[in-house]
């Protein structure tokens, strides 16, 4: 074979010579591609549900000295907008595309069968990590992901949308929308479930995420200092549940006793004095449903002030972790040439209503807050600890979003105006300055591409990539007078719509309990009224009509339609191919990991079902047979003192049955739940074919299983029952064969049942 032909077959780019002996041969090495010398590192720190005014450098009283220092030596963008919900905002940030256009128009919980709402990022839209990695950056992500469709979020499912498959060399964090800060569940290390059974005393998740990021940076800069990195640090802070470390919480005792009305005025005045808001921004009245602080009774004031103390302590903790990360950059000599961006995915949330909630999981499934219990928890110092799942009242939501009205889920300014801090000593000439150019979440990726010299590929994963929706604001980093590159933008979330064009903005707000009204638009002049206080729709109908047409055009090209105003019920819209695998009898076996709650919810949520546990028991055996959910909502079967114990857990109102004495040998426990409608139900319980209990009232029926899911033979993370919490993992010492779950019929008029209207809509589009 000729030598040139042999060379081309062995190594296509080999330019040496291969002879029969080494003496007759000439070696050749291909120089590997690397990032340009001096390419900056990039860190994007994404907060979760944090309002415009929460940081000290944006007018807040929360102690954020580390972020404030980055702002003092960097830039604050005071006219930055995002989209009003977690999954869409993250998709927009990571891809530079409008969220509907990449399939993330709502949360990752469902797939209704329409292009804009698949629940995960389309494969033809490269993420920041995928762009950077193609240009030889090391890529890392820690914290919250929430960009994978729920039914793809467990081992064995399609993992093409998991972080490592979307461009990150390293990932450590959780995949779901929220989790405990003290005992986070569904945690992942790369593509593997984290192995920790229970996190130790003093553990706090944001500290852990930051520690992992610091370890990655230190390791990489020790081994390959010439390689730049991209870090996506997505704190869950301050998304619910609001939980805080005791040492952080104590610093805020009494800080909010004056109430939300006074605190909002103080933030507004600081913002005005420091030029953080437009001179024309008015002081908004209280949002609908928010009571005057003075009208609350002393018990309510004491409890609600504590809620805000927890929120502040949580933001404070995130700032401490930013300080740890900055110190790492200083220690490794990376700070000056690292671009740091800090922002929030959306404005502060209003999920807890005007009086807040102590157990958000309970609220979601129909439980009513018990004020007497809440006050006792306040007295006992448990508010904000591991065993509460709180979200603050909407009065504090409006404080967080000062000076803007409304909140997360809406495209009013309170839902989409959030802080943006940019720190880059090597690329910013006027540290400490403000930038007033309108920038949007989709502009992050094109800006980073601009300043790092990277580019999106024209073809990716076998697809031709579509153009970016964002525009670079790199010119504004160096020049305060650089013209804004953005003039218009659409917004949509759960039927709530908005469109900004120049100085004008239209907004349409919808609620899930009412029929869609596609024509209820408001109009605001943002130059004269940036706080959106005065609706001008009736006086400028021609402007409203023009903007509606522009919105409609963008909505069509970005896959916004069909508009869907449903709330939790849309979580149960399953593709036909999933029906056969979600609603079938399934066996679960003993494993070191838990079975995700999203796999179990369709099997037991507001429906009849049978759970059949088969195991062996001999004298001395004890431990958990199975644990479903957590102490806020779930059930557990365990053996203790030679008896079988069953607890139907509802936080501080567990329902227990009389322990059943065991006889040595094989055991068959059967729990038959009958959902009777209106969230009510009862159960028959048998052991070894003998009926132990008949029609035990176990209301309310389960609706949504917490993400911690199902554990067989062990207690993982947060114990379902406090009766065995002191025993740690409480692993069963005998043999467990399996737990079999057989789904039955939905409850009559179930909340899970799609309406006839939705069925007809499916038929029309099939």
Image: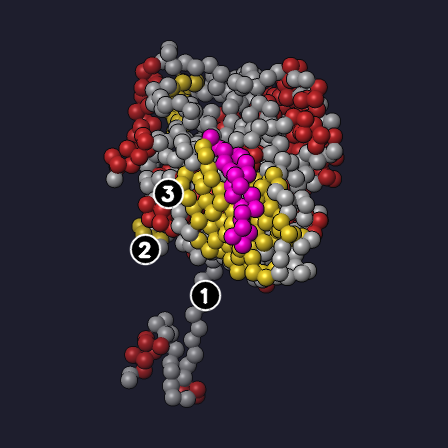
Residue lying at 62% horizontally and 41% vertically, measured from the top left: 656
Compared to residue 732, the image places residue 15 above or below, namely below
- Quarter occupied by residue 195: bottom right
What residue is disc 2 on?
A: 462
- Quarter occupied by residue 243: top right
Going from N to C along the chain, the mark reached first, 1 or 2, is 1
What residue is disc 1 on?
A: 32
Identify the residue at the far top of this view: 539
The reply to whether residue 346 is in sight is no
Measured as percent of width and height from the top left, residue 411 is found at 45, 27
Residue lying at 53% horizontally and 60% vertically, measured from the top left: 737
Please tell me whether residue 351 belongs to the stretch shown in magenta.
no
Question: Along the line of sight, which residue is nearer the eye, 437 or 672?
Answer: 672
Measured as percent of width and height from the top left, residue 606 is found at 46, 38
What residue is disc 3 on?
A: 574
Residue lying at 29% horizontally and 83% vertically, measured from the top left: 2
Look at the numbered discs 1 and 2 and tell me whether their residues touch, using CB distance below 8 Å: no
Going from N to C along the chain, the mark reached first, 1 or 3, is 1
Label 1 and label 3: CA atoms lie apart by 47 Å
Q: Provide the major secondary structure of the magenta segment.
A: strand
Compared to residue 469, the image places residue 732 above or below, namely below
Going from N to C along the chain, the mark reached first, 2 or 3, is 2
In magenta, the rendered stretch is: 678-700
Measured as percent of width and height from the top left, residue 23 is found at 43, 88
Which is closer to the viewer, label 1 or label 3? 3
Compared to residue 496, the image places residue 41 above or below, namely below
Which is closer to the viewer, label 2 or label 3? 3
The reply to whether residue 395 is in sight is yes
């Amino acid at each position: 074979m000729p030598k040139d032909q042999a060379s081309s077959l062995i190594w296509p780019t080999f330019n040496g010579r291969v002879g029969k002996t080494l003496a007759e041969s000439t070696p050749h090495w291909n120089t590997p591609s690397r990032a340009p010398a001096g390419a900056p590192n990039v860190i994007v720190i994404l907060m979760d549900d944090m309002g415009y005014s929460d940081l000290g450098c944006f007018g807040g009283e929360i102690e954020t000295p580390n972020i404030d220092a980055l702002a003092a030596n960097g830039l604050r963008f005071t006219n930055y907008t995002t989209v009003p919900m977690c999954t869409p905002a993250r998709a927009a940030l990571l891809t530079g595309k409008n969220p509907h256009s990449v399939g993330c128009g709502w949360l990752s919980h469902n797939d209704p069968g329409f292009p804009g709402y698949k629940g995960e990022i389309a494969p033809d839209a490269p993420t920041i990590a995928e762009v950077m990695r193609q240009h030889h950056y090391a890529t890392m992500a820690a914290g919250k992901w929430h960009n994978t469709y729920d039914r793809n979020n467990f081992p064995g499912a399609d993992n093409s949308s998991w972080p490592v498959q979307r461009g990150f060399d390293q990932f450590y964090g959780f995949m779901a929308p929220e989790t405990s800060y003290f005992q986070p569940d569904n945690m992942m290390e790369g593509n593997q479930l984290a192995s920790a059974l229970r996190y130790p005393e003093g553990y706090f998740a944001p500290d852990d995420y930051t520690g992992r990021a610091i370890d990655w940076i230190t390791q990489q800069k020790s081994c390959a200092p010439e390689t730049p990195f991209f870090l996506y640090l997505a704190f869950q802070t301050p998304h619910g549940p609001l939980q805080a470390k005791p040492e952080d919480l104590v610093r805020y005792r009494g800080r909010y006793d004056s109430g939300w009305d006074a605190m909002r005025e103080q933030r507004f005045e600081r913002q005005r004095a420091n030029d953080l808001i437009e001179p024309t921004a008015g002081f908004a009245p209280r949002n609908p449903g928010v009571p005057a602080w003075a009208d609350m009774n002393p018990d309510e004031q004491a409890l609600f002030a504590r809620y805000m103390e927890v929120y502040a302590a949580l933001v404070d903790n995130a700032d401490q972790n930013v300080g740890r990360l900055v110190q790492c950059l200083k220690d490794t000599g990376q700070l000056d040439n690292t671009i740091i961006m800090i922002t929030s995915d959306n404005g502060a949330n209003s999920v807890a209503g005007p009086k807040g909630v102590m157990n958000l999981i309970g609220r979601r499934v129909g439980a009513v807050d018990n004020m007497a219990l809440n006050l006792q928890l306040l007295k006992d110092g448990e508010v904000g600890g591991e065993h509460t799942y709180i979200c603050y009242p909407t009065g504090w939501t409006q404080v967080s979003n000062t000076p803007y009205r409304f909140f997360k889920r809406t495209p009013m300014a309170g839902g989409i105006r959030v802080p943006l801090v940019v720190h880059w000593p090597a690329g910013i000439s006027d540290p400490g300055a403000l930038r007033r150019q309108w920038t949007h979440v989709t502009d992050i990726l094109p800006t980073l591409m601009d300043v790092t010299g990277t580019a999106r590929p024209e073809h990716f994963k076998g697809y031709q990539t579509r153009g970016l929706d964002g525009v670079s604001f790199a010119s504004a980093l160096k020049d305060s007078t650089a013209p804004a590159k953005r003039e218009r933008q659409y917004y949509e979330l759960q039927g709530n719509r908005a469109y900004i064009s120049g100085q004008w903005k239209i907004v349409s707000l919808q609620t899930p309990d009412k029929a869609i009204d596609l024509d209820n638009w408001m109009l605001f002049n943002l130059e004269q009224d940036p706080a959106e206080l005065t609706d001008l729709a009736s006086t400028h109908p021609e402007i409203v009509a023009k903007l509606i047409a522009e919105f409609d055009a963008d909505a069509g090209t970005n896959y916004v339609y069909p508009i869907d105003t449903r709330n939790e019920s849309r979580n149960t819209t399953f593709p036909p191919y999933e029906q056969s695998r979600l609603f079938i009898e399934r066996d679960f076996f003993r494993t070191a990991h838990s079975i995700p709650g999203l796999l179990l919810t369709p099997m037991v949520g507001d429906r009849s079902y049978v759970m059949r546990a088969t195991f062996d028991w001999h004298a001395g055996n004890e431990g958990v047979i199975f644990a479903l959910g957590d102490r806020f909502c779930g059930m557990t079967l365990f053996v203790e003192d030679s008896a079988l114990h069953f607890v139907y857990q509802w936080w501080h109102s567990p329902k227990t049955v009389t322990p059943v004495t065991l006889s040595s040998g094989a055991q068959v426990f059967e729990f038959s739940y009958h959902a009777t409608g209106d969230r009510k139900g009862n159960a028959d319980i048998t052991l070894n074919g003998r009926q132990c209990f008949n029609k035990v009232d176990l209301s309310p029926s389960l609706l949504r299983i917490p993400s911690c899911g199902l554990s067989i033979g062990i207690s993982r993370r947060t114990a379902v029952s406090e009766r065995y919490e002191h025993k740690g993992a409480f692993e069963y010492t005998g043999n467990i064969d399996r737990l079999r779950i057989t789904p039955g019929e939905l409850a009559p008029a179930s909340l899970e049942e799609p309406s006839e209207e939705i069925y007809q809509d499916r038929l029309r589009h099939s």
